[in-house]
Amino acid sequence: MTEDLLAFIDQTVDDAIQDLGRLIALPSVAAKGEHMEETAQLVAEMLRGVGSETKIHETSGCPVVTGEIDVGAERTLLCYDHYDVQPAEPFDLWESPPFEMSVRGDRIYGRGVADNKGDFVTRLWAVKAFQETGTEIPVNLKFVVEGEEEISSPHLYEFVEDNREWLKADGGIWEFGGSGIDGKQEAWLGLKGILYVQLEVEALSHDAHSSLACVLPSAASRLVWALSSLKGADEHIMIDDFYDGIKPLTHAELEALSIIEMREEDVKKHYGITSFILGLEGDELKERYYNGPTCNICGIDTGYQGEGSKTVLPAKATAKIDFRLVEGMDPDTVLKGLRIHLDQHGFSDVKIAWHEGYPAAKTPVGHPFVELVSKANEEVFGHRLTLQPTSPGSGPLYLFDALVPMVSIGCGDFESRAHSPNETILIDNFQKTIKRMVVLIEMMKDY
């Protein structure tokens, strides 16, 4: 019956793309909190459309939508996705409206097509293939679709704590993935943690004429000095004890890394650089990419940013910073260390206005479910998955770590531009990702 399923996908891929367009049309930007209820309702409707028993779980933030197809099977497969997306700004860099899905050539464009609405639709369409061809689904299926992944999932913990037994499964497919720079499909087995903070300085009651900079304090200068104290020119993060407790990569992880080609020259060309920071290359580059924490300034807001000149002494300044955390690091500990560091370096006036975060988590490289997913990939894409022990990115994988082994695969590719203007996926990847999900569901019955 697998051939019938795959044929259905070939015949209906255009319909699947149109289904994706319904989701893209809703600008569910978690950072703005707009259209979240509406999008959750559409997700629930789409889950019901494939025969799922669906529920919308209210949290202190955006709802979590769940779906379940219980066929009484021995094995259960769980899928985690999210219906929220990143802000689409700057809008003027988009070649087509971000919330109007566009198909140009062999690619689909729109905010969320890669991260992660496209992946969600591929999973639904795989289930639809079973239903429409009259093929029995051989495993139980569960879906978790949250609405705050892009803002560090601050309320997903509530849902997980209330539903721990329900969340248990024999294997899980995490939200994202796709083909790497070499065109081969990758599986991400872990995610770094994150601590995201906003720093604020208020030096004056209101902006002043810049001529008064000779006697009045500048919020912009205070913030810049504070930021420069966090990391040196050698990229070393100068918060005391920041690196304490970091777990080294395991032997199995190092073995997996040994066969990964970083394609350093291609990556440098893609980003328009001549070298990586600190001249990193080879094994040292890999070690830092997979197991190196970061301190990154995401944005600074202060003073005048408009056309032409305006001589002003800024009263206020803010900066957003993300720390990517690796195994052995705790976001609360890093937050405390940041506060202590600022105070000890004379920046007690720099406020940590708000923060959010979570720790890293991984599925072992040698887990049997990882092997099963790789076999399913080989059936469809014609090659074994490139196993990435962890991702340089972050996600709330830690909440599921003890409940289900997770493998992150999806329909993206190296040119997908997630979080950037002109986010995109290949139609071929989208179509084959549906097929891979069908094959994985079939294989799960013998797992």
Image (tube, rainbow, N blue to C red):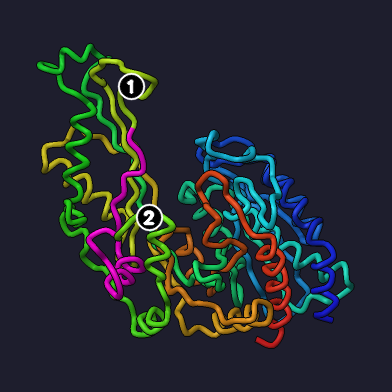
On the question of residue 309 being in view, the answer is: yes
Q: In the image, what residue type sits under mark 2?
A: Ile
Secondary element at image label 1:
loop
- Counting residues from the start of the chain, the first of labels 1 and 2 encountered is 2
The answer to whether residue 299 is above or below residue 447 is above
Q: In the image, what residue type sits under mark 1?
A: Tyr
In which quadrant of the rendered image does the C terminus lie?
bottom right
* Bounds of the magenta segment: 276-300
Quarter of the view holding residue 313: top left
Residue 357, position as x, y percentages in the image: 39, 52
Residue 16, position as x, y percentages in the image: 77, 57
On the question of residue 60 being in view, the answer is: no
- Residue visible at 83% across and 73% down in the picture: 7
Numbered tag placed on residue 194 in the rendering: 2
Tell me how far mark 1 sits from mark 2, CA to CA.
30 Å
**Which sits in the foreground, 17 or 438?**
17
Numbered tag placed on residue 304 in the rendering: 1
